[in-house]
Image: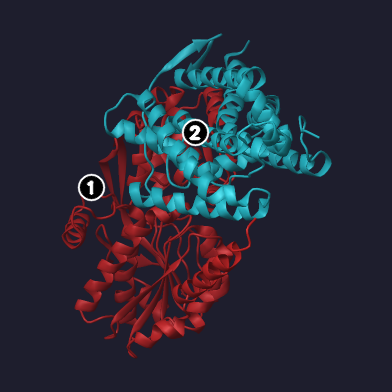
Amino acid sequence: MSHDFIPARRRILTAAAGTTVLVSSPGFVRSAFAQPNEFKIGFFIALSGPAALFGPTQRACADLGAEKINKAGGIMGRPVRLIFTDAGGPPAETAKSAVRLMLEDKVDLFIGSHDSATREANIATIKAKVPYIYSPVYEGGECSPNVYCLGETPPQQAQPATEFLAKEKNAKAFYLIGDDYVWPRKSNEQIKKYIAQYGGKVVGEEYVPFGAPNKFEEAVTRIKGIKPDAVIATLVGADNVNFNRTFAGFGLDKTIARLSMLLEENTLMGIGAENSANLYSCMGYYANSPAEGAKAFKAEYLAKYGAKAPQLATIGADCYSALNLAKALFDKAGANDMKKLTAASEGLSFDSASARVTMHGRQVDKDMYLASCKGTEFEVFKTIKAVKSGTACRA
Amino acid sequence: MEPVLVAQALNAVFGIASLAIVALGLAVVLGLLGVLNLAHGELVMIGAYCAYVAQVNGWPYLSAVPLAIAVCGTLGYAVERWLVRPLYQRPFDTLVVTWGLSLLLRKCAEAMFGLGYKNLREPIAGTVEVLGATYPRFRLVLIAVSVVVLGALFLWYGQSRTGRRIRATVSNPDLARALGVPVTRYASATFVVGTCLAGLGGVLIAPLVPVQPFMGFDHILMSFFVLVVGGLGSVGGLVTGSAVIGGANSVVSALSDSTGGYFFVLALAILFLWLRPRGIHGRG
C-alpha cells in the first residue's frame, strides 16, 4: 500500500478528533450560555438505538410543554430549560449521564421516558438526591423515594382489557408472550391474577430475549397447536411488530384475539392494516383519543409543528404530561425538597396530554381507553373513568 | 404426522432458507475476497427499502429486484473501488471502513425514510395446506427461491469458465494475474455480486420482518455465525452453516423457547470459533 495515504489518514483523524471535542463539549461549555435562575430538567429520551423512533415525538412534545410553562411564568417563577439526554443505550450508560447531569449541570429535576431497566439503574444512581418523574407505561409498584410515576400500570391496562376479553370475547384460555425483562415479567405476574379473577386460565407463557434478532415462526406455531382464545403480548417495538405480522401471516388472527400491552401508533403502522384484525389495546392516550384534553393537546401540537410533525403517540405525549406534573408539583410544594414534594404530590391534580388527572401515592389515577385496531388506526370503543393505579406509595 | 410437527419442520426449513439467502452476499465477499463487510446488514436493509419504494409507488413486487440490484450494485461498485480496493490485505482497516459505512448507510436510510417501521404487504398472501398443516404461502415461495438461487450459484461457480477464473484468483492472485486473469476486475465484480445478493436477500425478507434502519444488525449477526460454522469459500459451507445455525435455532426454539434457541446458537458459534475456527467446510 502506498505511504502517501498515511498523512491523509492523520489529517482525517485530527479533523475527527476536533469534531468529537466540539460535539461532546462538556456541561461547563454549554452552560456558559445559561441564565443563572433557570429551572434545569435532565430529560431522558431515546436519541439512539431502536427506541430512537420515539425520540422526535418525545422532544417535540417536551418542547411544547416547556414553551407553555415558560409562557405561564415557569416553574416556581424560574424559566424552564430542558437538557435532553440519550436513554436509548444500555441502562448503565444512561445512569452515567445522570451523574453528569447532577454534578455538572446541577439539574433540579429528572424526567425519564424510557424502559424500566433504565429506570431501575437511574434510581440506584440518583438515590433520591434529585426528584425523578418517570412517565411511560410501566409494571407498577415503583415506590422509591422522590420518584413520581405517571404511566399506565397493569391494574389500569390489564384489568379492564382482561375483563373485556373474558366477558365480550368469551376468552377462557390465555397465552402470554413477552420480551424477557422486568416490565413484561412483572406485568404478567399481575395479569395472571386478573385472568384467574375472570375465570380464565393461562395455557402458556414464554419470553423472548430482549434485543436479540428474534423470529416468531416457532412461537406462533406453538400457539397454534395450543389453540388459546386470546394472546396477551408484552412485546415492545420491533419484536411486537414482528410477532403480530407473523401471527397474522400464519392465519391465526381470524380465530385468536390479541391484546398488546404497549401498542401505539408507530408500532401499529409497522404491523400493518392486513395484520391488525382482532388486535386490541388499552392505553391512557391515543393520538385520536376522544378525550377533550387529548384533542386540545393535538391541536396545539399540530399548530406548533405543522402537518410534518412527528407522529403523536403515548410515548411522547407522556413527556408533555410529565412537564405539566412538574409545574403543578413544584409550584404547590414551593421548594425542591423531598418531603415537601412528596406531601404536595398527594391528591395533586394536573393536565395530562389526555385529561385532568390526579396523583395518589405518587402514581396517577386516570381514564383508560379500550381500543380495537381498524387498519392502522385505533378505534376507542370503551372509556373507563378514573382507574386506580393499584400502587400506593407511602409518603 | 401431527400438523404442528409439520409446521415446525417447515419452520426449520424456512429458518435455514431465509438465513442462507441473507448470508449469501456476506459469504461471497468474505469467502472469496477475504473482506468482512460489516455493512452487509445495511445492504440487506437497503434491499428491503427498495421493496418498500416499489410498494409505495404501486409498482409490482418483482420490480424491487432490478431496483435493489441497481442500487446495491452501484453502491457495491463504488465501495469496492474507493474504500475496499486500497485496503485489500489490511483486514482490520477494512473492518473499520465497512463498519463506518454501515453507520453512514443507516443514517442515510433514517434521513430518507425516517425511523418508523415500514409495513410491506406480502406479495403472495394467505396460507396453504401442506401435509395437514396450514403454512403461509410467501414463506414457502421464499424457501423455493432460496433453493433455486443457491443451486444456480453452486452450478455456475463450479462449472463456468468465470467461476474457474474466480477460484484461481482466490487461491493464488499473483499466479492468476500472471496467467492473464484480470484479477482487479474480478475482485470488483465479485464484490458487486455480493452486494447485489445482499440487496436481493433484503427484497425477499422485507414482507416478513419489521423494515427499519436498524434491521441490518439482526441479519449480519446471524449471517456471521453461519460463516463461522460453515466455513468460507464454498456454497456447501454456506448451506451447511445455515442448516446448523438456522436449523438449531428453529428446532431448539420449537422445543423450548426463543431464549433457548438463541443461547444454543451463541454456544455453537463460540464452540466452533474455539475448536474448529475454519468451520465445517473451511479451506486450508
Q: Residue at x 73, y 34 (%)?
A: B171
Type of amino acid at the residue the image marks with label 1? Asn
Mark 1: few/some/many CA within 10 Å (<14, 14-19, 20+): some
Q: In what element is the residue under mark 2?
A: helix
C-alpha span from label 2 to label 1: 42 Å
User: Which image quarter: residue B220?
Assistant: top right
- The chain carrying label 1 is A
Where's residue B196, x and y in %?
49, 33
Q: Is residue B135 above or below residue A346?
A: above
Q: Residue at x 47, y 67 (%)?
A: A393
Which shade of the palette goes to chain A? red
Type of amino acid at the residue the image marks with label 2? Cys
- The chain carrying label 2 is B
User: Which residue was labeled with disc 1?
Assistant: A288
Where's residue A253, x and y in %?
40, 26
Mark 2: few/some/many CA within 10 Å (<14, 14-19, 20+): many
* Label tally: 2
Where's residue A139, x and y in %?
48, 54
Q: In what element is the residue under mark 1?
A: loop
Q: Quadrant of the N terminus of chain A?
A: bottom right
Where's residue A87, x and y in %?
48, 63
The figure's colour scheme reads by chain
A313 left or right, relative to A112: left
For the residues beneath circles 2 and 1, the answer to whether they share a chain is no
Which mark is on residue B196? 2
Q: Nearer the viewer, residue A109 or A83?
A: A83
Q: Residue at x 53, y 70 (%)?
A: A11
